[in-house]
Amino acid sequence: MIRSVDVVIVGASLAAAAAAKRLVDAGLETIILEKQKLPRHKICSGILSPRGERFLIENFGALPNKILHEPNTCRGVSFHFPSMLSLSMDFFGGPTPHLHRKYADHWAIKQSHSEVMDETSFLSLSQDDDNVLVTARKKGGDSFQIKTRYVIGADGPVSPVLRSLYPSYHKDIPMFFVGQKFHEIIDCPLDEAYFHFWFHPDLGHYTWSHARDGRQIVGVGYKVGEKFHDRHRYVAKYFEEKHGVYLKPADTDHEGCSENFGPSLINRYVFGKGRVLITGQASGFLNMIGEGMSCALHSGAIAGESIVDAMLRNKAVQEVYRKKIASEVRRTTDQWNPLKIAFSKPHEADFPKALMALPAKDRLILLRDVWHFVKLYKEFKWGRQIAALSMQRLLRGDYAQKKWL
Ligand SMILES: Cc1cc2nc3c(=O)[nH]c(=O)nc-3n(C[C@H](O)[C@H](O)[C@H](O)COP(=O)(O)OP(=O)(O)OC[C@H]3O[C@@H](n4cnc5c(N)ncnc54)[C@H](O)[C@@H]3O)c2cc1C
């Protein structure tokens, strides 16, 4: 017999935990399907924004120590430029916890009190006006079906749920590879209280480093198609020559994954179809420097609330979700909006203050460095779209919904 539930959530991550919390609190029978065994590994620096920290505490309670990496807090971010200028910014409100995603996500999922089926992969779905039929498979077992009123795809950047709705979506957007290697430290002058990011076009689209559990991470990100080990070697050599970072050869546990960086810059989010909602990074939410946890948590909660509202008021769930999610779209896309960056404070660390603390000559050098870095993204033709969106936000106070899928 096919089991029938109110909601199936795909992916046991932070967006899922937030959605499940709202649904379970409203008394809805909810199942989370996770393809990996829990607690599962998640590639992530674990740097949480103040907004993300507040969400976790308010919804799931005080954070236990066992869900943190060493150093167990982060003060903010430090930007480095080709001119060798560096700029450190503290998070508003003080240091935030340095999350160990394997345990943090599992803790949040448990705190949601939802039923979870791990080692169970979502395979496909079909929907009609009243229900969705989900096909999944338990590891080593046969496929089975669940009938549900709604589905939430909280299944990350390569979202199989999104793919089941829009099969060619991921071929139509630029996908990036991000990879990190872990090194024993010989000597590292980079302040371990900060997450370090390089605005350097020669190093790649996304270059970062930080301390974790006694080792130093060297991370590289670039358009899919280049060679991870070559890029990593180049960056590690640059760190040594320019910043005096002396590291032992990388340990064997390096890792990487695909990222859908881009949709939040150009307001190309995907929120689903019919009774299927897409949320978290799957829908395109990613804040500046790749901070995705806070928007995953908030968008996940909004997806859950939208289902509760749609059921209570007998409304079409897409209509409710799209109305409610506009606030999170504003927050995230504002982070990439040059007018907002210049005249408001869309980020959670004070970039304008750090910039103004530099001598005027250095400010100009730094802005020139940023401009050279931004040109790296020219091939994606995002510049004009970002400029048009900035004007749209200024004139109508919002970003248009017609570009959302
Ligand atoms: C190298 C790197 C560093 C990062 N550093 C930071 C950082 O410091 N701070 C920050 O805020 N963000 C960071 N991010 C981004 C952040 O990790 C993501 O934005 C965030 O995890 C998105 O959460 P999510 O809930 O949307 O989904 P995800 O965390 O991506 O989780 C999706 C879940 O879905 C599951 N799943 C996928 N397919 C299926 C299937 N077929 N069936 C069942 N389950 C499935 C996956 O196993 C996974 O558990 C980083 C990302 C990378 C790659």
Image (spheres, rainbow, N blue to C red):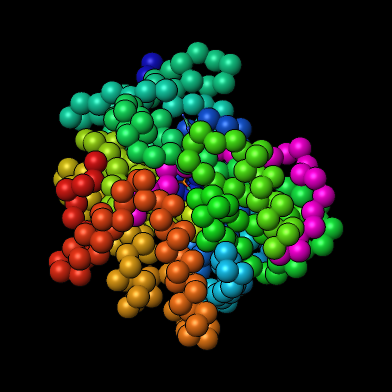
Tell me if residue 62 comes above or below residue 35 in the rendering: below
Q: Is residue 288 left or right of residue 320?
A: right
The percent position of residue 234, horizontal first and vertical second, equals 66, 47
| The N terminus: image quadrant | top left
Prevailing secondary structure of the magenta residues: loop
Q: Position of residue 202 (x, y in %)?
A: 55, 52
Residue situated in front as seen by the camera: 221 or 139: 221
Residue 275 placed where, x, y %? Answer: 25, 36
Query: Where is residue 270 shown, x and y percent of the image?
Result: 29, 43
Residue 259 covered by magenta stretch: yes
The structure residue drawn at horizontal position 48% and vertical position 20%, both measured from the top left corner, is 137
Give the vertical position of 80 relative to 314 (above or below): below
Residue 128, can we see it?
yes
Highlighted range, magenta: 243-265
Front-most of 25 and 139? 139
**Can I make out residue 325 in this image?**
no
Q: Residue at x 17, y 29 (%)?
A: 129
Question: Position of 292 compared to 189: left or right?
Answer: left
Residue furthest top in the image: 142
